[in-house]
Image: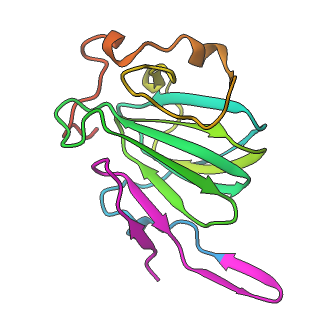
Amino acid sequence: MAPKNHPTPIEGVALLEPQVHGDDRGRFIETYRREWLPQGREMIQGNRSEKSAGSLVGLHYHLHQADYWYVLRGTARVVLADLRVGSPSEMKTFVVDLDGDNERGLFIPPGVAHGFAALSDMLLWYLVDGYYNPADELGVAYNDPALNIDWGIEGPVVSPRDQTNPTVAEIPEGVRPTWGLRT
């Protein structure tokens, strides 16, 4: 059965709520189906990310890779920012809390910066449609004033890589994604 698709302010982002089946034994959820995302591509790798409360990851973006995120345990404040030049939603942000108890999956197309703050200890399972490519691992400052993001935590624990990401204004020409390019 197709999940409920919640609207988002960013073009191409899909927030899906799969159907939950349960009884006294527990529950079953089909978390992802390729057919739910006609704009998506085949997901070829699955990853697991565990973070402690207070951790912040991002903002990261890819020119060629899409992600599908699903929080299995805990709560993540997920932040998206549309960096695609010429997009109908260019520079719009979207903040949503994904929680292991409220079943929702999030599709993130290439060119949309993404990150999360662990509001509690958490476990994120995610799929990608491309293998790791260091040349396509790009970032933008999580605290860029132009994005004005409320991460929901004070004094976040941030990796050295994410502490040095440029602001949107500092991203070199040709490195900022362009709307409509699909590679």
Residue 120 position, x and y percent, is 75, 45
Q: Is residue 156 above or below residue 5?
A: above
Side of 174 relative to 147 (left or right): left
Q: Is residue 33 above or below residue 90?
A: below
Which residue is painted at 48% across and 25% down in the image?
137
For this rendering, which residue is in front, 159 or 135?
Answer: 159
Figure quadrant of residue 132: top right
Which residue is painted at 54% across and 10% down in the image?
164
Figure quadrant of residue 38: bottom left
Give, as a single range, the part of the protein colored magenta. 1-28
Inspect this view and state whether residue 45 appears.
no
Magenta stretch: residue 27 in it? yes
Side of 38 relative to 129 (left or right): left
Quadrant containing the C terminus in the rendered view = top left
Side of 172 relative to 122 (left or right): left
Residue 159 position, x and y percent, is 67, 19
Which residue is painted at 46% across and 75% down in the image?
3
Residue furthest toward the bottom?
A: 23
For this rendering, which residue is in front, 40 or 71?
Answer: 71
Magenta stretch: residue 87 in it? no
Here the colouring is rainbow
Q: Is residue 126 above or below residue 134?
A: below
For this rendering, which residue is in front, 170 or 36?
Answer: 170
Which residue is painted at 35% across and 18% down in the image?
168
Residue 79 position, x and y percent, is 49, 40
Residue 133 position, x and y percent, is 49, 27
Inspect this view and state whether residue 85 appears.
yes
